[in-house]
Image: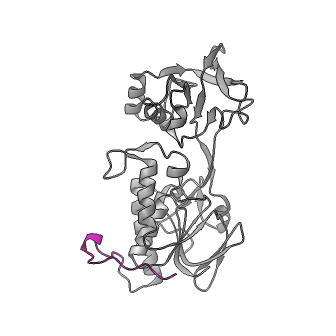
Amino acid sequence: MNLVDVTVIGGGPCGLFASFYAGLRGMSVRIVDSLPELGGQLTALYPEKYVYDMPGFPKVLAKDLARDLIAQGVQFGPELALEETAQVLEKTEDGYLITTTKGTQLPTRTIIIAAGAGAFQPTKIGVPREEEFHGSGIHYGVRDKSVFQNKRVAIVGGGDSAFDWALNLLDVAGDMSLIHRRDVFKAHEDSIEKVKDSRVDMKIWYAIKELHGDGKLTGVTLEHTQTKETLHHECDEVIVNIGFKSSIGPIKEWGLEIEKNQIKVDQFFETNLPGIFAVGDVCAFPGKLKLIATGVGEAATAVCIAKTRIDPSAKLFPGHSSDMETPPAPAAV
């Protein structure tokens, strides 16, 4: 691969905005992502879920937000290295050399790590036959709402994702229930109240202990977490929203300062390794908020600092894009 000004690790919202802003500043860019498509968790986990906290959008489907972020992020022609996982980092005369798990070598002057929570795997219920019903009754995300059309749907979890999907599927699903092992929730108060006031059957203090069906899920056995009494609950589909286990993987071996699976950065979003930055959910600093809205701001700052590292004569602040007569042409790679 060619030497580029900045390699962005992660093709989610923050990585895509970093790519756009670097292109806006006339930098050559490469995006590396282990997934086969750009968009990160917006496309991989919850494309049909609404996002409510993006500036300019009262609400927007994750897949639509991803579509526009991708269009913005690739408009300056970044080099794409999809289905590639950054593994080994070496210091070079020009900056750094990243070698992927496939052996691809990616030379770069600077690096912006926007890997989100890293590689993620859904937390499973942990009951017999769970793998058997994966895709035929058990789901760990929703990619297509039509799958649940007129179905009896049970949602497991007590956080934002569980309550958001309970509300999101009201216009699609038939009978709906929300199963949670206690009466304390971690979702937004407004979502909790809306679900409680809806037709969703709240199965509080219950956990799934058995799955039933022959090739296709037909129901579950619920156990009361306090009394241990059981009951049979008929359902066609179970959506499991009890979290994800994530890891930033080989990046942990790069010599970066790591704190609870996050990369420590300074006020410029630069790590302890010069020319390597971290933005979005993967970075840690006092007062950190894990929001797309704040992450894209971090990405813009990191790009501007990286620009001055490559070209000390460059201005830190390039001016407002609305003042530009014409945007810069795509950087040569």
User: On the rendered image, what quadrant is the N terminus found in?
Assistant: bottom right
Q: Quadrant of residue 331?
A: bottom left
Q: Can you tell which quarter of the image residue 9 is in?
A: bottom right
Compared to residue 151, the image places residue 122 above or below, namely below
Residue 290 in view in this figure? no
Q: What residue is at 44 percent from the left and 66 percent from the top?
A: 73
The residue lying at 66 percent from left, 34 percent from top is: 136
- Above or below, 286 against 79 in this view is above
Taking the image as shown, residue 315 lies to the left or right of residue 228, namely: left
Q: Main secondary structure of the magenta part?
A: loop
Q: Magenta segment, which residues?
A: 316-333
Residue 29 versus residue 276: which sits nearer the camera?
Answer: 29
How many callouts does the rendering have? 0
Res. 141 visible in picture: yes
Give the percent coordinates (x, y) of residue 82: 60, 64
Q: Give the x, y percent position of residue 201.
A: 49, 20
Q: Does the magenta-highlighted stretch encompass residue 123?
A: no
**Colour mapping used in the image:** one colour
Q: Nearer the viewer, residue 130 or 301?
A: 130
Q: Quadrant of residue 32?
A: bottom right
Q: Relative to 133, is 204 above or below?
A: above
Q: Is residue 331 magenta?
A: yes
Left or right of 240? Residue 63 is left
Q: Where residue 234 sits in the image (x, y, percent)?
A: 61, 19
Give the residue at x 68% y 65%.
253
Q: Where is residue 72 drawn, in percent x and y? A: 41, 64
Q: Is residue 12 above or below residue 301?
A: above
